[in-house]
Amino acid sequence: MNVAQCQAVLVRLADHFPFWGAKLSDERIANLAEDWAMVLADLEPREVSAALATLLSQKREFPPGVGEVNEAARGLIAKAQGEIEIAAAEAWQRVTRAVVSDGYGAMWDASLKARLTPAEIQTGEAIGLRRIRNRLEEDAGTDFAQFRDTFNAISKRATVERNMPPMVHNVIAALAAAWDMKRLAAPKGGAE
């Protein structure tokens, strides 16, 4: 979405929310449009329109902000690409079925692992496959609680990453590269 397209969206939102729209001058709309274009730069107008339709179909007192529109649009895109959202309890069941015994250890059943989401796999490996496989009945609540908290944190991090505008990804990549260059150029500390 470019600035002109975002400006058109804001004018349209002002029509939907007249009390909010009455407070907007042309200058404020232009400023907001620049901000919206920065966040929505890589999205197509039809994707933003679909997100707005979703958001406007809900009972609202105030217009959606650019963050809400961004999150809704990227969520719709992810869903269209087959990304599934599952609750931690369902993820726990799917992961515990996919972890099988391997002598005294544990490993993934390859066919069941292939059906898991990246968040489920990452959570299973963070908790530990052996711990998941050898869980004791008396620790079931504790094991699930730790799995749930880890799964929710990993899922939230993935959502934040997905919703981040490309400009922010580029800035982070540039900072990371600069940090790596500083680290590589730094003298080795300590006596040898």
Image (cartoon, rainbow, N blue to C red):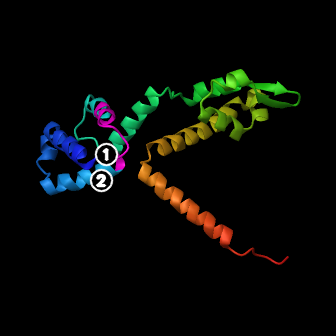
Q: Which mark is residue 109?
A: none
Magenta residues (range): 39-50
Name the spot of residue 16 as percent of width and height, x first: 16, 36
Q: As rendered, which of 119 and 180 lies closer to the eye?
A: 180
Q: Tell me the CA gap for discs 2 and 1.
A: 8 Å
Indicate whether residue 41 is drawn in magenta.
yes
Identity of the residue drawn at 50% across and 26% down? 82
Name the spot of residue 20 as percent of width and height, x first: 16, 46
Q: Residues within 10 Å of mark 1 (few under 14, many from 20)?
A: some
The C terminus: image quadrant: bottom right
Asked if residue 97 can be seen in this view, the reply is no
- Which element carries disc 1, helix, strand or loop? helix
For the image shown, how many numbered marks are present on the structure? 2
Indicate whether residue 97 is drawn in magenta.
no
Q: As rendered, which of 77 and 140 lies closer to the eye?
A: 77
User: Is 152 on the left or on the right of 134, as rendered?
Assistant: left
Mark before the other along the chain sequence, 2 or 1: 2
CB contact under 8 Å: marks 2 and 1: yes
Residue type indicated by callout 2: Asp
The residue to which callout 1 is attached is 66
The residue to which callout 2 is attached is 35
Asked if residue 35 can be seen in this view, the reply is yes
Q: Is residue 100 above or below residue 18?
A: above
